[in-house]
Amino acid sequence: MTPTALEVTVAGIEFQNPVLLAAGTAAYGREIARVIDLDALGGLVTKAVSIERRHGARAPRVAEFEGGMINAVGLANPGVEEVRTEHLPWLAKTLRRARVLVNVVGNQVEEFATVVSMLDDSPGVSGYELNVSCPNVKAGGMEFGADLQSLTEVVTRARKATRRPIFVKLSPTLQDIGRTAQAAADAGADGISVVNTLPGLVIDVDARRPALGFGTGGVSGPGLLPIGVLATYRVAKAVRVPIIGVGGISKATDIVQYVIAGASLVAIGTAAMQQPRLPERLVADLGRWCTEKRITSLSEIRGSLQWEN
């Protein structure tokens, strides 16, 4: 049984514990369900969903290095129609307790709302995560999240397309992540996810070429932990909506750091790919930590960082 201390209600969604699988980690659930009990977790965020199928970046798409992992998948996905007719129904039939958030991407402002509206009658979907780190084709490739006007329009349109909760996932490279989070909340976002990966380059020294087929990629892993925790703290000071803390989690105390910084939920990515059963263990470890510290609810420590800055 999951300890009561770990139960949390976020944006009206009841989670049995705060541990999610981050977008891209579990695809749409089928493959990883063979090695992990998804229903032991709070939930999962699906792989990206776009209007049309995306073939993604050329191989190799993932490379490990001493400090973590770098990837350039290119948001490959089968498109909204296949996700709607095949993947989400499977999740709805399979999961009893874990919640599902659908990660949504687009090339243009209106595409996010289109995907949301096409999925909104799907069973088992608890909410959406808008990946506004995508490039806006109409704005010369600038990330949606880096342009407050585009961000506001993305969220406003998506808000009109659903009554379900909307989380907006932000990049760690934003100049003022608190201000960006506030703009998303003002436009109707129910929550904020921080952070996405950091841009980086890993070189194959023998070939003198990038280790990834695309060249550059997103850096994730342990080194992202303090970046994600700081972003969570800054967003928590700027907005009153709940936060999903993402980046670098591999221990129960990493989760605790995010909660103290202000997160209501956390999402695990790289560590879950390297050790698929780790998220289940972290739920148990977090429960034990709460028992040892006599914490009866994570709300007791949420946002409790003692720091005057």
Image (cartoon, rainbow, N blue to C red):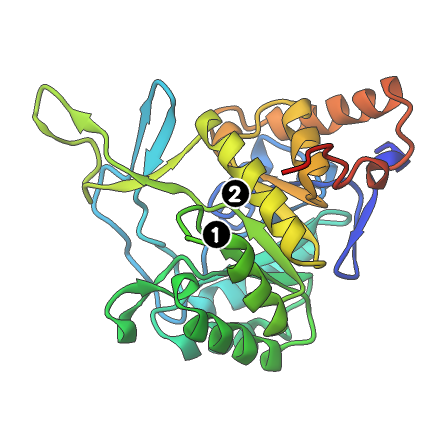
Q: Amino acid at mark 1?
A: Lys
Secondary structure beneath label 1: loop
Q: Could you tell me residue 295's position as x and y percent?
A: 88, 29
Q: Is residue 134 above or below residue 119?
A: above
Q: Which mark is residue 47?
A: 1
Q: Residue at x 79, y 61 (%)?
A: 12
Q: Residue at x 26, y 65 (%)?
A: 141
- The amino acid beneath tag 2 is Ala
Q: Secondary structure at mark 2?
A: loop
Do the residues under discs 2 and 1 have CB atoms within 8 angstroms?
yes
Res. 87 in view: no
Q: CA distance from mark 2 to mark 1?
A: 7 Å
Q: What quarter of the picture does the C terminus occupy?
A: top right
Task: Pinpoint residue 18: horizontal percent, then vertical percent.
Answer: 72, 41
Residue 76: numbered disc: none
User: In the displayed image of the protein, which residue is found farthest to the left?
Assistant: 207
Percent from the top left, x then y, of residue 290? 84, 25
Indicate left or right for 205 with 115 as reference.
Answer: left
Near-viewer residue (57 or 224)? 224
Looking at the rendered structure, which numbered label has been put on residue 26?
A: 2
Q: Is residue 107 above or below residue 60?
A: below
Question: 10 Å neighbourhood of mark 1: few (<14), some, or many (≥20)?
Answer: many
The residue depicted at 42 percent of the width and 74 percent of the height is: 150
Q: Position of residue 140 (x, y in %)?
A: 23, 69
Is residue 74 at all visible to an observer of this figure?
Answer: yes
Q: Residues within 10 Å of mark 2 (few under 14, many from 20)?
A: many
Furthest residue in direction front, as rendered: 309
In the rendered image, the vertical position of residue 106 relative to residue 252, given as above or below: below
Is tag 2's residue or tag 1's residue first in the polypeptide sequence? 2
Check the image and report above or below for 55 versus 160: above
Image-based side of 135 in relation to 93, left or right: left
Tell me the quarter of the picture where residue 126 sits. bottom right
